[in-house]
Image: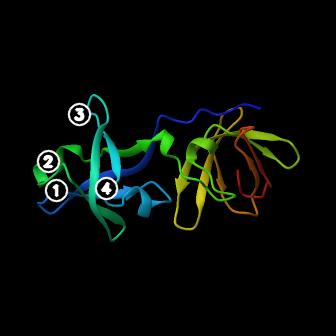
Amino acid sequence: MRVMNQPKWLTVGQIVGTHGIRGEVRVVSRTDFPEKRFSPDTRLFLRHPRLESPVPLVVERSRPHKRVLLLKFREWNNINDAEPYKGGELMVEGSEVLDLDEGEYYFYQIIGCEVVTTEGERIGVVTDILQLPANDVWVVQPDGGGRDILIPYIDDVVLQVDPDARRVTIRWMEGLR
């Protein structure tokens, strides 16, 4: 059994713009736990090409706004503080993983797993996860190249996930290729 390495950083959001003139930013959440990750007094780290290393920021307040969250950090008091960091990633340290319920996984646990059918045929490797409104879709790079295969993360298709063995077992359905 291979033990996967826990990443140093987990991305929880991306700054997509500013809001107003008081330093608020619009953030697209990349976590299933926005109420925890973006609560007041939470410390996040900003990674951006303008920065040599991640910079800590403390959430002062957050609130939902349309399809994003509006966050105000203690360190930013006006639009000029926030503007240079549009496009930046908000992260937490990898050691801050939260306990998950049965059937829930972090992206780093799934990406890189081999995908096999119930008949034992190896399909390829999970390379990305798309978060869509209906359900997540796992992008699989097929063995031997070719177009990516999109696997919906639904009970009828994904039958077993074994992050320790780095293996996902699926029920092959017509139309997946």
Looking at the image, residue 92 sits to the left or right of residue 52; the answer is right
Task: Name the residue rendered at 48%, 60% in the picture.
Answer: 33
Q: Nearer the viewer, mark 1 or mark 4?
A: 4
Residue, far top: 52
153 w.r.t. 47: above or below: below
Quadrant of the image for the N terminus? top right
Q: Residues within 10 Å of mark 3 (few under 14, many from 20)?
A: few
Amino acid, disc 4: Asp
Q: How is the image coloured?
A: rainbow
Of 144 and 89, the residue lying toward us: 89
Q: Earlier in the sequence, mark 2 or mark 1?
A: 1
Q: What residue would you read off at disc 4?
A: 41
Amino acid, disc 3: Arg
Q: What residue would you read off at disc 3?
A: 50
Q: What residue would you read off at disc 2?
A: 81
Amino acid, disc 2: Asp
Q: CA distance from mark 2 to mark 1?
A: 6 Å
Q: Are marks 2 and 1 in contact (CB under 8 Å)?
A: yes
Displayed quadrant of residue 174: bottom right
Dot 2: element = helix
Displayed quadrant of residue 171: bottom right
Of 96 and 66, the residue lying toward us: 96
Q: Nearer the viewer, mark 3 or mark 1?
A: 1
Of 146 and 32, the residue lying toward us: 32
